[in-house]
Image (cartoon, coloured by chain):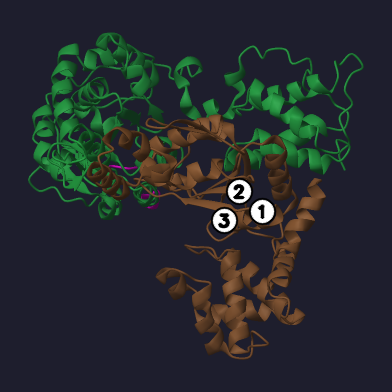
């Protein structure tokens, strides 16, 4: 597969990737290195992993990071209740000697995303979402797994990877990542799309959208991004906005100011933004876009 | 339209050119090394190398590591590969004699210790030492002492005393929000893994029930000390405190500012307190000058804070709040800092005076962002903050 073919394949699944992004994903596949994707919320970072798993026709394993994420939620955990029961059952039956062997076997192991990702028959896509929310200790642990692709379980020994997953990490700047992690990854920064790209995304995701309305929506959102906002709307917001307009049966942004203002709830996500972007401003932007 | 660089005939081939490019990036402050050069070469083997857009994308993915680098990459790429035939860089990949000198990062003030050298001050070291300072409000004619030897201001004894206080404050600051549990004798949940292990000794009967609990996590202190003219008489106390803090706590970090901001943690970590103050004098040049609190803090929150400040950090600002800059800058700086999730404690030496009100425009702008606003002008005052720090 070449880079252009990958880009087309992703477009077929409804993801319009810029050249830079497609190249980064392509290299991540070819070089077998993790890909770190940074960008504002709602520009489609997580979506890349989903689409990539569809293109490669494989499983998507997702690990959502949060503060305090630890090994027992990210890697593996023993099924303690089942172990206790097994011990009791074995004691009743009088086979105490075998029990230690038995309860620390695969049967009693609960796989969490990281362990699951290296034990698939077909290499999955491992999405480590919002890595900057996890704390530094976890980042260090992740580094080890990304370098060796093996997990050591004291009771069971080292579990080597049967296949090496395609690893995608996303971050949106809650915390700065360590240089060690950045060094190990390929890097791509996803920004807000330009007019043409956004139009293509809209066409790919909403095929039955009228062309004139699509142009209006993209023009509207592009102008809205130029206003000073606390939270600039991403592509996800554009798609929500489109869905709202289609659901309400609006064919032209300028016809009903009150209704348009009501749909702004899909684009403006903070109180200050809602307050600052008044009906007049909305109408002015919509007028320019039309 | 720029043309592709023509490399000289003696150039050793594509490998050397890529190595030269990596060297070029390094010279401009990118943190890239041999491993990245190797990865670039293998990445290029998957590309059509005659298509510059493709090569650009591939090299960008491999060689950049953060948004800032990605933004600068295009210009650097153009200047190396597409400079219309002018070969500006050697491609022989000769080791750059002093790579970090050219780096824009250090130029922005990270390591001013080596090159920043002589200021333009005519009266170098000639300024009268008008403030032996006893912490009283003294009318002083403060002159611009561009190079003041801080060894005269802060004695090793002060530092040792401050070290004790700093250590106690550090211990008082614990974060009680940790979510990850650890084995503990008085825990609130069962430590199942241990229960299982230990029950094997008793034939599967869980007799001992080990617990786990949420441990307190230490918080990191970042001290930012104002050493502008109006703060000169308090400098002794505060610098001793900062020095003590850095020596007592390995995770702590310290900065000082007057019209610009300098990171002093590394200098203060010197094992010999006297030598540490000597190194600090070099860094602190401009000591006792004007103050740009807003500008300095803004720079802090946009650069260092992104690396060193997180949700488990307490930022300690030691300043009187007399700012010559715009109060909006200060407000913006503090709101950016708050967004990193840290707590901000402002210790103001003037607040102790009977009729003090935070009317200085800067101070008023800062108030909404502060977690704690307290007076402090002696070491004893700092020590008495302990109970309040504990509640933070």
Instruction: Name chain B's colour.
Output: green
**Helix, strand or loop under label 1:** helix
> How many labels sit on residues?
3
Q: Marks 2 and 3, how far apart in space?
A: 12 Å
The residue range painted magenta reads B322-329
Q: Quick check: A158 above or below B374?
A: above
| Residue B324 shown in magenta | yes
Query: Closer to the observer: label 2 or label 3?
Result: 2
Q: Quick check: A204 above or below B369?
A: below
Chain assignment, label 1 = A
Q: Nearer the viewer, residue B271 or A136?
A: A136
Residue at the spot 15% in from the left edge and 13% down from the top edge: B157
Chain assignment, label 2 = A
Estimate the x, y position of residue B280 in percent, counting from the top left.
Answer: 34, 18
Considering the image in quadrants, where does the C terminus of chain B appear?
A: top left
Q: Quick check: B86 above or below B200?
A: above
Estimate the x, y position of residue B290 in percent, counting from the top left.
Answer: 35, 33
Residue position for label 3: A46
Residue position for label 2: A125
Check contact, mark 2 vs mark 1: CB within 8 A: yes
Instruction: For label 1, count other residues whose C-alpha is less than 10 Å away and answer few (under 14), some (14-19) or many (20+).
Output: many
| Residue B25 shown in magenta | no
Residue at the spot 40% in from the left edge and 28% down from the top edge: B262
Magenta segment's dominant SS is loop
Considering the image in quadrants, where does the N terminus of chain B appear?
A: top right
Residue position for label 1: A52
Chain letter corresponding to the colour brown = A
Chain assignment, label 3 = A
Residue at the spot 34% in from the left edge and 23% down from the top edge: B265
């Amino acid at each position: 597969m070449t880079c252009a073919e990958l880009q087309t394949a992703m477009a077929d699944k409804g993801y319009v990737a810029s050249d830079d992004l497609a190249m980064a994903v392509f290299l991540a596949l070819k070089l077998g290195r993790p890909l770190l994707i940074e960008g504002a919320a709602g520009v489609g970072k997580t979506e890349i992993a989903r689409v990539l798993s569809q293109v490669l026709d494989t499983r998507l394993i997702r690990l959502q990071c949060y503060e305090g994420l630890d090994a027992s939620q990210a890697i593996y955990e023993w099924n303690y209740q089942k172990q206790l029961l097994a011990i009791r059952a074995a004691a009743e039956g009088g086979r105490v000697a075998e029990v230690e062997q038995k309860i620390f076997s695969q049967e009693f192991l609960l796989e969490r995303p990281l362990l699951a990702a290296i034990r698939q028959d077909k290499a999955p896509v491992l999405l480590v979402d919002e890595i900057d929310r996890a704390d530094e200790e976890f980042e260090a642990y992740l580094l080890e797994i990304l370098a060796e692709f093996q997990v050591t379980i004291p009771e069971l020994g080292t579990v080597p990877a049967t296949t090496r997953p395609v690893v995608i990490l996303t971050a949106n700047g809650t915390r700065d990542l360590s240089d060690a992690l950045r060094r190990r990854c390929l890097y791509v920064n996803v920004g807000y799309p330009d007019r043409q790209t956004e139009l293509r995304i809209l066409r790919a995701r909403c095929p039955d959208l009228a062309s004139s309305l699509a142009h209006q929506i993209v023009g509207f959102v592009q102008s809205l991004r130029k206003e000073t906002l606390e939270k600039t709307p991403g592509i996800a917001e554009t798609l929500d906005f489109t869905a709202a307009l289609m659901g309400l049966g609006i064919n032209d942004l300028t016809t009903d100011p009150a209704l348009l203002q009501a749909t702004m709830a899909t684009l403006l996500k903070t109180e200050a933004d809602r307050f600052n972007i008044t009906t007049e401003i909305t109408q002015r932007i919509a007028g320019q876009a039309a | 339209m720029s043309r592709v660089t023509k490399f000289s005939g003696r150039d050793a081939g594509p490998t050397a050119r890529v190595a030269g490019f990596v060297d070029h990036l390094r010279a401009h402050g990118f943190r890239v090394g041999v491993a990245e050069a190797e990865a670039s070469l293998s990445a290029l083997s998957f590309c059509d190398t005659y298509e510059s857009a493709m090569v650009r994308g591939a090299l960008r993915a491999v060689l950049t590591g953060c948004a800032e680098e990605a933004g600068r990459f295009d210009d650097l790429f153009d200047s190396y590969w597409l400079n219309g035939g002018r070969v500006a860089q050697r491609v022989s990949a000769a080791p750059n004699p002093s790579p970090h000198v050219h780096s824009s990062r250090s130029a922005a003030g990270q390591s001013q210790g080596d090159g920043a050298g002589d200021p333009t001050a005519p009266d170098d070291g000639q300024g009268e030492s008008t403030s032996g300072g006893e912490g009283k409000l003294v009318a002083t004619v403060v002159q611009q002492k561009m190079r003041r030897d801080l060894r005269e201001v802060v004695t090793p004894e002060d530092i040792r005393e401050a070290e004790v206080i700093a250590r106690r404050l550090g211990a008082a600051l614990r974060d009680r929000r940790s979510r990850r549990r650890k084995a503990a004798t008085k825990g609130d949940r069962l430590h199942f893994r241990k229960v299982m292990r230990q029950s094997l000794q008793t034939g599967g009967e869980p007799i001992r029930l080990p617990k786990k609990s949420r441990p307190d996590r230490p918080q990191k202190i970042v001290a930012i000390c104002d050493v502008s003219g109006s703060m000169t008489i308090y400098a002794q106390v505060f610098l001793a405190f900062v020095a003590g803090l850095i020596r007592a706590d390995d995770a702590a970090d310290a900065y000082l500012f007057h019209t610009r901001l300098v990171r002093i943690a590394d200098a203060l970590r010197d094992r010999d307190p006297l030598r540490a103050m000597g190194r600090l004098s070099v860094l602190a040049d401009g000591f006792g000058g004007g103050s740009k609190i807003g500008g300095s803090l803004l720079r802090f929150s946009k650069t260092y804070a992104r690396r060193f400040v997180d949700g488990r950090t307490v930022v300690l600002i030691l300043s009187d709040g007399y700012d010559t800059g715009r109060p909006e800058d200060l407000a913006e700086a503090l709101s950016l800092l708050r967004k990193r999730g840290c707590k901000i404690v402002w210790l103001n030496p003037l607040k102790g005076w009977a009729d003090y009100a935070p009317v200085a425009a800067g101070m008023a702008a800062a108030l909404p962002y502060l977690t704690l606003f307290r007076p402090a002008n002696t070491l004893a005052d700092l020590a008495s903050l302990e109970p309040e720090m504990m509640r933070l």
